[in-house]
Amino acid sequence: MAVYTVSQVSSHIKESLESDTLLMDLWVVGEVSGLRASSAGHTYFSLKDRDSLLRCVMFRGMKGAELLSEGDSVSAHGKITFYTRGGTTDFMVDLAMPEGVGELALELERLKQKLAAEGLFETSRKRQLPRFPKKVGVVTSPTGAVFHDIQNVLQRRYPLTELVLSPTIVQGQDAGPKIAAALELLDREGGCDVIIIGRGGGSLEDLWPFNEEVVARAIYACKTPVVSAVGHETDETISDYVADVRAPTPSAAAELVVPDAQVLRRNLEMTASMMFRILTDQNSRRRSEVLAAARRMEVSLPDTQTMRRRVDDVGRMVQSASSRLLQESRIQVEGLSLRLRALDPIATLGRGFSIVHLPHTGVVVSSTKQVEIGDALEISVADGSLPAVAGDGIPDQKPKYTTARSKETRPRPKARPNQPSGMAPLL
C-alpha cells in the first residue's frame, strides 16, 4: 500500500484541478457572501446558492470588484485553483458583473480584459493617419450601404483618392475569420495608405464579429493604419479599441481619412494671398532700401568735374615743369659740349698746336728733360704725324732742342760739312 505525504497529495490535487480545461475557463452564477477587502486592495468573498458555497478571490485591478455587494447575485468569470499552503480550493475571479447581463456581454468584457492585458489597446502604439492618402482601402460588405456612403464622401471631399474594396461578410457565425482574412489581404497586397473596417448599426449579436479575438489580432498585426467604423455612434466593439482611430460611423470614418478639398482650396487661396502680400511688402521695402542706397551712393560719389579740372591743372603744371627741365637740360648739355670741345686735343691741334711723342713708348714729351739730342720724335698735328730728331739747328739762338721738318713735306737735304750728323735743318 502506497503512502503519500500531505505535500504530494496537495500537489496532485493542484495539478488535477488546474489542468482541467473546464475549470480553467469558468463562468459561475451565485450570491455574494462574506465580502471583504484586504489592505492590499484584494477582494475576498464567496459565491453560494441553496446547497453549496465557493470561496472566491479577486486580486486588485480586476474588473467588476467595485460592483460587488453583499447578497447580490453576480456572474463571475475565472478559474479554479488549489492553495496548497492553506489546503483550500479557491475560485480566482478576473471579471464580475451583476446577474442578468447577457452571455455575450460577459464574454465581451472578458475578452476586453484579456486583450488589454496583452497591450492591444495601448495608446502609445496607435499611428497617425496620413494627411493626403493616395489610396484608401475598405473592408466591408459589397452589398451594404457602408461602401457606397464612404465612396460618396470621398468623391465629394477628396476625389484624388483611389478607393479599394476588400469584400467580406460582416454578420454571422463565420464573419469574424472572413473579416480578418479580408483585412490581411488588403494590408498585404492593396498598397493602401489607410484602411477603414466596419459595417452599419445593429444589435450586439449583429456586431459580434467585430468583437472576436481573431479580428482584434488581425487589426493589431496590420501594418497599415486602421480606422474602425462599426455601427452607430453609441456602439462600441473591440475593433474600436484595437484600431488606430475610432470613427462613430462609416461616413465619419471617410471624413477622417481624407481632407476636404474645399477647405484645402480656401487655405491655398488664403496662403497665396498672404504670400502675395508678404512679397509685395518685401518688394516695397527692398525698393526703398535700394533707393536709399542709391541716394547714399550719389552723395558719396566724387566730384568728377572738379577732379577733371584738377587733372588738367596738374597736367599743365607737369608739362610746364617738363619743358623747363628739358630746356635747362639742353643748356647744360650744350655747355658741357662746348667744354668737351674746348678740351678736345684734336681741336687744339687744329688751332696750330702740335703734340710731341716718343715713338717707341708713345709718351708725350712735356719737358726738355725727357729728350736727348739725337732722339727720335713723332710730332702730331691736325691732319697727321711727322717724324723728327732732336737737335740744335740754330747756333746763334743756341736752342737746346728744336723741331725737325717732316719727311713727308720736304726731303731731308744732305748734311753740310759744318752740321752735326743726324740733325734735321730747322724750318
Image (cartoon, rainbow, N blue to C red):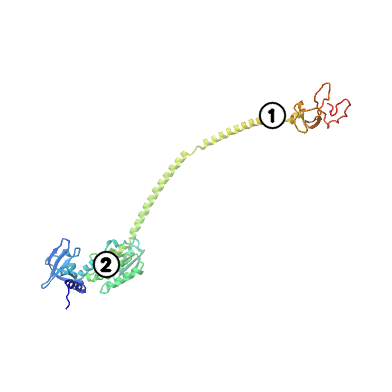
Q: Is residue 230 visible?
A: no
Measure the C-alpha gap from mark 2 to mark 1.
128 Å
Q: Is residue 389 left or right of residue 211?
A: right
Task: Check the image and report above or below for 192 versus 303.
Answer: below
Q: Is residue 178 visible?
A: yes
- For the residue labelled by badge 2, is the local secondary structure a helix, a strand or a loop? helix
Task: Check the image and report above or below for 7 versus 398.
Answer: below
Q: In x, y percent, where is residue 376?
A: 80, 31
The quarter of the image holding the N terminus is bottom left
Q: Is residue 115 left or right of residue 331?
A: left
Tag 2 near tag 1, CB within 8 Å: no
Q: Amino acid at mark 2?
A: Ser
- For the residue labelled by badge 1, is the local secondary structure a helix, a strand or a loop? helix
Q: Is residue 41 left or right of residue 288?
A: left
Q: In x, y percent, where is residue 111?
A: 23, 68
The quarter of the image holding the C terminus is top right
Q: Would you name the residue on which mark 2 appears?
A: 239
Q: Which residue is found at the position 42% from the left and 46% from the top?
A: 286
Q: In x, y percent, where is residue 383?
A: 78, 32
Q: Would you name the residue on which mark 1 appears?
A: 339
